[in-house]
Protein backbone atom coordinates (compact mmCIF):
# COMPACT_ATOMS: atom_id res chain seq x y z
CA UNK A 1 0.00 0.00 0.00
CA UNK A 2 2.59 2.54 1.16
CA UNK A 3 4.94 1.36 -1.52
CA UNK A 4 2.37 1.82 -4.29
CA UNK A 5 1.86 5.44 -3.23
CA UNK A 6 5.61 5.92 -3.11
CA UNK A 7 6.08 4.69 -6.66
CA UNK A 8 3.13 6.72 -7.97
CA UNK A 9 4.82 9.77 -6.45
CA UNK A 10 8.15 8.83 -8.00
CA UNK A 11 6.60 8.35 -11.43
CA UNK A 12 4.91 11.73 -11.04
CA UNK A 13 8.19 13.40 -10.09
CA UNK A 14 9.98 11.84 -13.05
CA UNK A 15 7.22 12.94 -15.41
CA UNK A 16 7.53 16.53 -14.19
CA UNK A 17 11.29 16.30 -14.38
CA UNK A 18 11.12 14.90 -17.93
CA UNK A 19 8.82 17.69 -19.08
CA UNK A 20 11.14 20.31 -17.63
CA UNK A 21 14.44 18.92 -18.82
CA UNK A 22 14.98 15.67 -20.70
CA UNK A 23 18.73 15.65 -20.39
CA UNK A 24 18.71 16.19 -16.64
CA UNK A 25 16.14 13.44 -16.16
CA UNK A 26 18.26 11.01 -18.14
CA UNK A 27 21.20 12.00 -15.98
CA UNK A 28 19.13 11.41 -12.82
CA UNK A 29 18.27 7.89 -13.99
CA UNK A 30 21.90 7.21 -14.79
CA UNK A 31 22.93 8.40 -11.34
CA UNK A 32 20.22 6.28 -9.68
CA UNK A 33 21.53 3.20 -11.43
CA UNK A 34 25.16 4.05 -10.70
CA UNK A 35 24.62 4.36 -6.97
CA UNK A 36 22.49 1.21 -6.83
CA UNK A 37 25.11 -0.71 -8.78
CA UNK A 38 27.80 0.60 -6.44
CA UNK A 39 26.26 -1.00 -3.35
CA UNK A 40 24.52 -4.07 -4.80
CA UNK A 41 27.32 -6.63 -4.09
CA UNK A 42 27.56 -5.73 -0.40
CA UNK A 43 23.80 -5.55 -0.16
CA UNK A 44 23.32 -9.11 -1.44
CA UNK A 45 26.01 -10.35 0.96
CA UNK A 46 24.28 -8.74 3.94
CA UNK A 47 20.88 -10.18 3.03
CA UNK A 48 22.19 -13.75 2.88
CA UNK A 49 24.27 -13.47 6.08
CA UNK A 50 21.27 -12.09 7.97
CA UNK A 51 19.15 -14.93 6.64
CA UNK A 52 21.63 -17.43 8.05
CA UNK A 53 21.76 -15.63 11.42
CA UNK A 54 17.99 -15.50 11.86
CA UNK A 55 17.67 -19.15 10.86
CA UNK A 56 19.80 -20.04 13.90
CA UNK A 57 18.21 -17.64 16.37
CA UNK A 58 14.56 -18.52 16.85
CA UNK A 59 12.48 -16.52 19.36
CA UNK A 60 12.27 -19.44 21.82
CA UNK A 61 16.03 -19.65 22.20
CA UNK A 62 16.25 -15.90 22.65
CA UNK A 63 13.55 -15.57 25.29
CA UNK A 64 15.01 -18.30 27.52
CA UNK A 65 18.30 -16.40 27.64
CA UNK A 66 17.04 -12.92 28.41
CA UNK A 67 14.44 -13.08 31.18
CA UNK A 68 14.08 -10.37 33.82
CA UNK A 69 16.50 -12.20 36.11
CA UNK A 70 19.28 -12.18 33.53
CA UNK A 71 20.17 -8.58 34.54
CA UNK A 72 23.16 -6.92 32.89
CA UNK A 73 24.34 -10.23 31.46
CA UNK A 74 21.03 -10.50 29.64
CA UNK A 75 21.35 -6.86 28.53
CA UNK A 76 24.83 -7.50 27.16
CA UNK A 77 23.63 -10.62 25.39
CA UNK A 78 20.71 -8.69 23.90
CA UNK A 79 23.04 -5.94 22.80
CA UNK A 80 25.29 -8.44 21.07
CA UNK A 81 22.41 -10.20 19.34
CA UNK A 82 20.85 -6.89 18.33
CA UNK A 83 24.18 -5.62 17.01
CA UNK A 84 24.92 -8.67 14.92
CA UNK A 85 21.50 -9.38 13.50
CA UNK A 86 19.52 -7.15 11.24
CA UNK A 87 15.85 -7.81 11.68
CA UNK A 88 13.39 -5.44 10.00
CA UNK A 89 11.27 -3.41 12.44
CA UNK A 90 8.09 -5.01 11.11
CA UNK A 91 9.35 -8.32 12.53
CA UNK A 92 11.41 -7.03 15.45
CA UNK A 93 8.69 -5.13 17.30
CA UNK A 94 6.06 -7.87 17.40
CA UNK A 95 8.80 -10.37 18.30
CA UNK A 96 9.92 -8.09 21.14
CA UNK A 97 6.34 -7.79 22.39
CA UNK A 98 6.02 -11.57 22.26
CA UNK A 99 9.26 -12.02 24.17
CA UNK A 100 8.08 -9.66 26.90
CA UNK A 101 4.86 -11.66 27.18
CA UNK A 102 7.02 -14.78 27.51
CA UNK A 103 8.99 -13.39 30.41
CA UNK A 104 11.74 -11.31 28.85
CA UNK A 105 12.60 -8.13 30.78
CA UNK A 106 12.02 -4.56 29.58
CA UNK A 107 15.65 -3.64 30.15
CA UNK A 108 16.80 -6.53 27.96
CA UNK A 109 14.26 -5.79 25.24
CA UNK A 110 15.15 -2.10 25.34
CA UNK A 111 18.76 -3.08 24.74
CA UNK A 112 17.81 -5.43 21.94
CA UNK A 113 15.66 -2.89 20.08
CA UNK A 114 18.21 -0.09 20.47
CA UNK A 115 21.21 -2.08 19.31
CA UNK A 116 19.20 -3.56 16.47
CA UNK A 117 18.53 -0.07 15.21
CA UNK A 118 21.81 1.68 15.87
CA UNK A 119 24.57 -0.90 15.67
CA UNK A 120 25.18 -2.79 12.46
CA UNK A 121 27.94 -5.37 12.49
CA UNK A 122 26.90 -7.18 9.31
CA UNK A 123 26.35 -3.93 7.45
CA UNK A 124 29.88 -2.78 8.26
CA UNK A 125 31.27 -3.65 4.80
CA UNK A 126 28.75 -1.20 3.34
CA UNK A 127 29.37 1.48 5.93
CA UNK A 128 33.13 1.20 5.43
CA UNK A 129 32.71 1.59 1.70
CA UNK A 130 31.04 4.96 2.28
CA UNK A 131 32.73 6.29 5.42
CA UNK A 132 36.00 4.43 5.84
CA UNK A 133 37.08 2.07 8.62
CA UNK A 134 37.77 4.52 11.40
CA UNK A 135 34.44 6.35 11.44
CA UNK A 136 32.50 3.11 11.00
CA UNK A 137 34.16 1.55 14.03
CA UNK A 138 33.81 4.70 16.15
CA UNK A 139 30.15 5.16 15.27
CA UNK A 140 29.27 1.57 16.05
CA UNK A 141 31.22 1.48 19.32
CA UNK A 142 29.56 4.70 20.43
CA UNK A 143 26.14 3.36 19.55
CA UNK A 144 26.86 0.08 21.33
CA UNK A 145 27.76 1.86 24.58
CA UNK A 146 24.79 4.17 24.22
CA UNK A 147 22.34 1.26 24.00
CA UNK A 148 23.25 0.19 27.57
CA UNK A 149 22.22 3.63 28.75
CA UNK A 150 18.97 3.48 26.77
CA UNK A 151 18.19 0.07 28.26
CA UNK A 152 18.76 1.35 31.78
CA UNK A 153 16.50 4.39 31.37
CA UNK A 154 13.77 2.30 29.73
CA UNK A 155 13.81 -0.14 32.63
CA UNK A 156 13.53 2.72 35.13
CA UNK A 157 10.56 4.20 33.28
CA UNK A 158 8.81 0.89 32.60
CA UNK A 159 9.29 -0.95 35.89
CA UNK A 160 10.80 1.57 38.30
CA UNK A 161 14.48 0.48 38.57
CA UNK B 1 36.47 -11.99 -13.87
CA UNK B 2 35.55 -8.40 -13.10
CA UNK B 3 32.07 -9.45 -12.03
CA UNK B 4 33.54 -12.22 -9.90
CA UNK B 5 35.81 -9.76 -8.12
CA UNK B 6 32.97 -7.35 -7.52
CA UNK B 7 30.64 -9.99 -6.12
CA UNK B 8 33.16 -12.07 -4.14
CA UNK B 9 31.46 -11.33 -0.79
CA UNK B 10 28.14 -12.49 -2.17
CA UNK B 11 29.84 -15.60 -3.53
CA UNK B 12 31.24 -16.35 -0.07
CA UNK B 13 27.78 -16.05 1.47
CA UNK B 14 26.34 -18.40 -1.17
CA UNK B 15 29.07 -20.93 -0.39
CA UNK B 16 28.32 -20.57 3.33
CA UNK B 17 24.63 -21.18 2.82
CA UNK B 18 25.39 -24.22 0.62
CA UNK B 19 27.64 -25.70 3.31
CA UNK B 20 24.95 -25.07 5.89
CA UNK B 21 22.40 -26.72 3.64
CA UNK B 22 24.49 -29.90 3.21
CA UNK B 23 25.13 -30.26 6.95
CA UNK B 24 21.72 -29.22 8.24
CA UNK B 25 19.01 -29.22 5.61
CA UNK B 26 16.42 -27.75 7.98
CA UNK B 27 18.32 -24.67 9.07
CA UNK B 28 19.78 -24.29 5.59
CA UNK B 29 16.33 -24.25 4.06
CA UNK B 30 15.15 -21.77 6.68
CA UNK B 31 18.11 -19.50 5.94
CA UNK B 32 17.40 -19.62 2.20
CA UNK B 33 13.75 -18.82 2.79
CA UNK B 34 14.47 -15.90 5.12
CA UNK B 35 17.06 -14.46 2.71
CA UNK B 36 14.66 -14.80 -0.19
CA UNK B 37 11.90 -13.17 1.82
CA UNK B 38 14.06 -10.21 2.87
CA UNK B 39 15.28 -9.80 -0.68
CA UNK B 40 11.68 -9.78 -1.91
CA UNK B 41 10.76 -7.00 0.50
CA UNK B 42 13.84 -4.89 -0.13
CA UNK B 43 13.82 -5.26 -3.88
CA UNK B 44 10.66 -3.15 -3.75
CA UNK B 45 11.90 -0.37 -1.51
CA UNK B 46 15.52 -0.08 -2.66
CA UNK B 47 14.94 1.17 -6.23
CA UNK B 48 12.62 3.83 -4.79
CA UNK B 49 15.39 5.18 -2.57
CA UNK B 50 17.84 5.32 -5.45
CA UNK B 51 15.39 6.88 -7.88
CA UNK B 52 14.60 9.70 -5.45
CA UNK B 53 18.32 10.09 -4.87
CA UNK B 54 18.99 10.50 -8.59
CA UNK B 55 16.38 13.25 -8.84
CA UNK B 56 17.69 14.95 -5.71
CA UNK B 57 21.20 14.87 -7.08
CA UNK B 58 20.26 16.46 -10.37
CA UNK B 59 17.70 19.03 -9.28
CA UNK B 60 18.76 20.34 -5.87
CA UNK B 61 21.64 22.80 -6.23
CA UNK B 62 24.60 22.51 -3.92
CA UNK B 63 24.18 26.11 -2.78
CA UNK B 64 20.70 25.39 -1.45
CA UNK B 65 21.85 22.41 0.60
CA UNK B 66 24.83 24.34 1.98
CA UNK B 67 22.53 27.16 3.02
CA UNK B 68 20.11 24.84 4.83
CA UNK B 69 22.40 22.17 6.20
CA UNK B 70 25.99 23.30 5.69
CA UNK B 71 28.48 25.00 8.01
CA UNK B 72 26.74 27.60 10.14
CA UNK B 73 23.26 26.20 9.53
CA UNK B 74 22.95 25.70 13.31
CA UNK B 75 19.76 24.36 14.84
CA UNK B 76 17.94 24.63 11.52
CA UNK B 77 20.43 22.21 9.98
CA UNK B 78 20.10 19.78 12.88
CA UNK B 79 16.31 19.89 12.69
CA UNK B 80 16.38 19.30 8.95
CA UNK B 81 18.78 16.38 9.36
CA UNK B 82 16.35 14.82 11.82
CA UNK B 83 13.37 15.48 9.59
CA UNK B 84 15.08 14.04 6.52
CA UNK B 85 16.17 10.92 8.39
CA UNK B 86 12.85 10.39 10.17
CA UNK B 87 10.61 10.77 7.15
CA UNK B 88 12.23 7.98 5.18
CA UNK B 89 11.68 4.26 4.93
CA UNK B 90 14.09 1.39 4.60
CA UNK B 91 16.92 -0.21 6.56
CA UNK B 92 19.97 1.58 7.97
CA UNK B 93 22.18 0.75 5.00
CA UNK B 94 19.76 2.66 2.79
CA UNK B 95 20.96 5.77 4.61
CA UNK B 96 24.57 5.50 3.40
CA UNK B 97 24.03 6.29 -0.29
CA UNK B 98 21.75 9.18 0.70
CA UNK B 99 24.46 10.43 3.05
CA UNK B 100 26.91 10.27 0.15
CA UNK B 101 24.75 12.61 -1.94
CA UNK B 102 24.30 14.94 1.05
CA UNK B 103 28.07 15.10 1.50
CA UNK B 104 28.45 15.88 -2.18
CA UNK B 105 25.99 18.73 -1.76
CA UNK B 106 28.05 20.26 1.03
CA UNK B 107 26.05 19.28 4.11
CA UNK B 108 27.96 19.72 7.37
CA UNK B 109 29.50 16.47 8.59
CA UNK B 110 27.88 16.47 12.04
CA UNK B 111 24.52 16.86 10.28
CA UNK B 112 25.36 13.81 8.15
CA UNK B 113 25.90 11.81 11.34
CA UNK B 114 22.65 13.14 12.83
CA UNK B 115 20.86 12.16 9.64
CA UNK B 116 22.18 8.60 9.92
CA UNK B 117 21.22 8.46 13.59
CA UNK B 118 17.70 9.67 12.80
CA UNK B 119 17.36 7.21 9.95
CA UNK B 120 18.28 4.39 12.30
CA UNK B 121 16.15 5.28 15.32
CA UNK B 122 13.51 7.96 14.86
CA UNK B 123 11.79 6.89 11.66
CA UNK B 124 8.16 7.94 11.97
CA UNK B 125 6.49 4.84 10.45
CA UNK B 126 8.65 2.63 12.67
CA UNK B 127 7.78 4.57 15.81
CA UNK B 128 4.08 4.16 15.14
CA UNK B 129 4.64 0.45 14.74
CA UNK B 130 6.75 0.33 17.90
CA UNK B 131 4.06 2.07 19.96
CA UNK B 132 1.50 -0.37 18.64
CA UNK B 133 3.65 -3.36 19.68
CA UNK B 134 5.39 -2.23 22.87
CA UNK B 135 3.20 0.57 24.15
CA UNK B 136 3.27 4.37 24.16
CA UNK B 137 5.47 4.59 27.25
CA UNK B 138 8.21 2.42 25.76
CA UNK B 139 8.22 4.20 22.39
CA UNK B 140 8.18 7.74 23.76
CA UNK B 141 10.85 7.00 26.35
CA UNK B 142 13.17 5.57 23.72
CA UNK B 143 12.56 8.55 21.46
CA UNK B 144 13.25 11.05 24.25
CA UNK B 145 16.60 9.42 25.03
CA UNK B 146 17.60 8.78 21.42
CA UNK B 147 17.14 12.32 20.07
CA UNK B 148 19.57 14.05 22.45
CA UNK B 149 21.79 10.95 22.34
CA UNK B 150 22.16 11.16 18.55
CA UNK B 151 23.01 14.87 18.68
CA UNK B 152 25.56 14.46 21.46
CA UNK B 153 27.24 11.46 19.81
CA UNK B 154 27.48 13.26 16.47
CA UNK B 155 29.18 16.25 18.00
CA UNK B 156 31.52 14.15 20.14
CA UNK B 157 32.61 12.12 17.10
CA UNK B 158 33.17 15.22 14.96
CA UNK B 159 34.96 17.18 17.67
CA UNK B 160 37.11 14.64 19.47
CA UNK B 161 37.35 11.42 17.50
CA UNK B 162 37.95 12.52 13.94
CA UNK B 163 40.43 15.19 12.93
CA UNK B 164 39.40 17.88 10.43
CA UNK B 165 41.62 16.16 7.89
CA UNK B 166 39.98 12.81 8.32
CA UNK B 167 36.53 14.34 7.82
CA UNK B 168 37.77 16.19 4.74
CA UNK B 169 39.19 12.98 3.35
CA UNK B 170 35.82 11.24 3.62
CA UNK B 171 33.96 14.19 2.09
CA UNK B 172 36.47 14.66 -0.70
CA UNK B 173 35.58 11.30 -2.16
CA UNK B 174 32.09 12.57 -2.95
CA UNK B 175 32.80 16.20 -3.71
CA UNK B 176 35.07 15.36 -6.61
CA UNK B 177 32.45 13.21 -8.26
CA UNK B 178 30.58 15.03 -10.99
Image (cartoon, coloured by chain):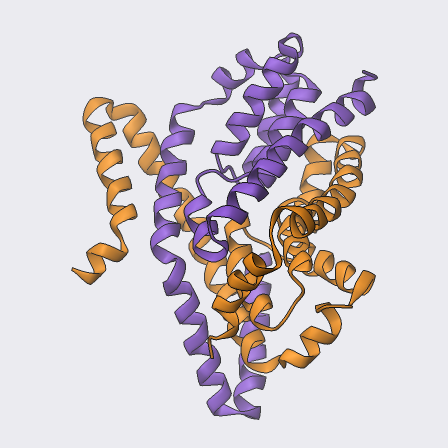
Chain colours: A purple, B orange
Q: Where's residue B106, x and y in %?
A: 63, 71
Is residue A4 among what the camera can see? no
Position of B136 with respect to A45 (left or right) is right
The image shows residue B106, relative to residue B94, as above or below, that is below
Which residue lies at the image location 74% right of the left edge and 48% below the top edge?
B151
Q: What is the x, y in percent for residue A128?
A: 45, 50
Which residue is depicted at the point 70% across and 79% down? B64
Q: Residue at x 67, y 80 (%)?
A: B63
- Residue at the left extreme, as displayed: B1
**Quarter of image, res B164:** bottom right
Answer whether residue A23 is visible to the viewer in this image.
yes
Above or below, B21 relative to A4: above
Residue B70 rendering spot, x and y as whole percentages: 70, 69
Residue in the image at 34% along x and 30% along y: B30
Identify the image quadrant of the N terminus of chain B: bottom left
Residue B113 lies left or right of residue A57; in this view the side is right
Q: Is residue B109 above or below residue A139?
A: below
Query: Which residue is outermost to the top?
Result: A69
Residue B22, x across and y down, in percent: 18, 27
Q: Is residue B87 above or below residue A9?
A: above
Q: How many marks do you count on the picture?
A: 0
Amino acid sequence: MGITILYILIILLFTISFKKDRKKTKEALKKSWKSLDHILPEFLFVVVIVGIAIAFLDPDTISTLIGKQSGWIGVTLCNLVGSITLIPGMIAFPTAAMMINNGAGYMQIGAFISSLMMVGVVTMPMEIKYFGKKLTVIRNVFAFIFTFFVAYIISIVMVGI
Amino acid sequence: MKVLKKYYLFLISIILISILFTFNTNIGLKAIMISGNTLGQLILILPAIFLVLGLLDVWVPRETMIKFMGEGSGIKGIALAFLLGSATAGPLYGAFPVAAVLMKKGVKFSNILIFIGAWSTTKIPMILFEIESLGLKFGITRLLIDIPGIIIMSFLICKYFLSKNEILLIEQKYKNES
